[in-house]
Image (cartoon, rainbow, N blue to C red):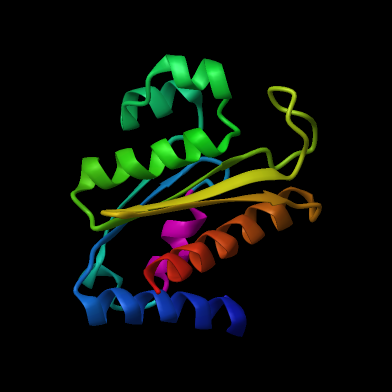
Amino acid sequence: MDSAEGSLVRQVHEVFKERGLFLSVAESCTGGLLAHLITQIPGASDFFLAGIVAYSSAAKMKLLGIKSGPLTEYGTVSSQIAMEMARRAREATGSDYALSTTGNLGPSTLEGKPEGLIYVAVSGGQKEAHKELRLSLGREGNKHQAAMEGLRLLLDTLK
């Protein structure tokens, strides 16, 4: 973890610990990277409850309870599904906030959506937010940048 990443992750740790809040994540395109980054720093167990990697549509339905209708209507790469993933993760784990990621890392189109189109979302009580990302950093770069942007959105939502 480089210093910029470490600083961002430490900020998440500090905010959640100071406020006595709990966090969970629901990841698709980041494939567990968010949970990995959060738990790399000691003390994550004070606030981090769970990470759910629901990579396929079937896993999104089974693990998060997302209905097939919205998946068919909007596609897995959509702000609607990102928001639903965050809401469902929060409900499933009992966390105060949940962060989700879904998108197309590349190298080709997915559901007619271009490489690098990624959505991050946060659900927390009365606060919800989502952000569309259009990245062009290659598969690994897109994955990493999506995780960082998700953490930034989480911190912005908590402000």
Tell me: residue 144, above or below residue 44.
above
Name the image quarter holding the N terminus. Answer: bottom right
Who is closer to the viewer here, 22 or 55? 22
Left or right of residue 37: residue 47: left
Q: Which residues, given as a range, are shown in magenta?
A: 32-40
Tell me: residue 45, above or below residue 69.
below
Residue 133 x/y as whole percent: 67, 51
Residue 82 x/y as whole percent: 49, 40
Residue 53 in sight here: no
Residue 158 x/y as whole percent: 37, 69
Tell me: residue 127, above or below residue 103.
below
The image quadrant of residue 105 is top right
The image quadrant of residue 78 is top right
Left or right of residue 15: residue 119: right
Residue 145 x/y as whole percent: 65, 60
Q: Is residue 18 magenta?
A: no
Residue at screen point 67% across, 38% down? 104
Tell me: residue 2, above or below residue 116.
below
Name the image quarter holding the C terminus. Answer: bottom left
